[in-house]
Image (tube, rainbow, N blue to C red):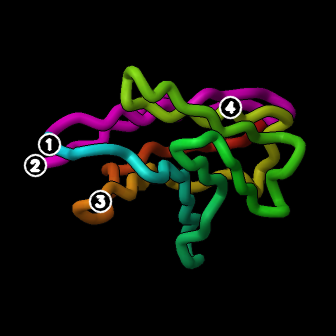
Amino acid sequence: QVQLVESGGGLVQPGGSLRLSCAASGSFASILVMAWYRQAPGKQRELVAAITSGGTTNYADSVKGRFTISRDNAKNTAYLQMNSLKPEDTAVYYCKMRAPGGEYWGQGTQVNVSS
């Protein structure tokens, strides 16, 4: 079994910062890609950022220059540093991991950006 545990969500004012973490545990040979998605009320889930095992990153246009994805391969953990947060960043943020055996999702962490 593979488990992803996200943490770091919360309430922040516009312009503020948050750092999300996603720790993977369980039985898997390797982690190919770790990614963050988000889903706002009434909207489809969308890709926010992704990072490969080699460190190649990809970002949604809406977060480029504000969010940074990183990973610690030794800890099987991915991070999402979110700066200059806007109200439209409010959503549930989900971690997804792609391994040779399949894809796995975390339970999500709520991020609220509001004054």
What is the magenta segment's predominant secondary structure? Answer: strand
Marks 2/1 in contact by CB < 8 Å: the verdict is: yes
Residue that mark 4 sits on: 81
Around disc 3, counting alpha carbons within 10 Å, would you say few (fewer than 14), some (14 to 19), or many (20 or more)?
Answer: few
Query: In the displayed structure, does residue 30 sit left or right of residue 47?
Result: left
Residue that mark 3 sits on: 100
Where residue 97 sits in the image (x, y, percent)?
39, 53
- Choose the circle earlier in sequence order: 4 or 1: 1
Residue that mark 1 sits on: 27
Q: Which residues are magenta?
A: 1-26
Around disc 1, counting alpha carbons within 10 Å, would you say few (fewer than 14), some (14 to 19), or many (20 or more)?
Answer: few
- Please name the amino acid that badge 1 sits on: Ser
Mark 2 vs mark 1, foreground winner is 1
- Choose the circle earlier in sequence order: 2 or 3: 2
The residue shown at (75%, 62%) is 60
Residue 27 position (above or below residue 71)? below
Residue 3: within the magenta? yes
Mark 4 vs mark 3, foreground winner is 3
The residue shown at (83%, 60%) is 62
Where residue 91 sits in the image (x, y, percent)?
58, 55
Secondary structure beneath dot 3 equals loop
Secondary structure beneath dot 4 equals strand
- The answer for how far apart the CA atoms under marks 2 and 4 are is 28 Å
- Choose the circle earlier in sequence order: 2 or 1: 2
Marks 4/3 in contact by CB < 8 Å: the verdict is: no
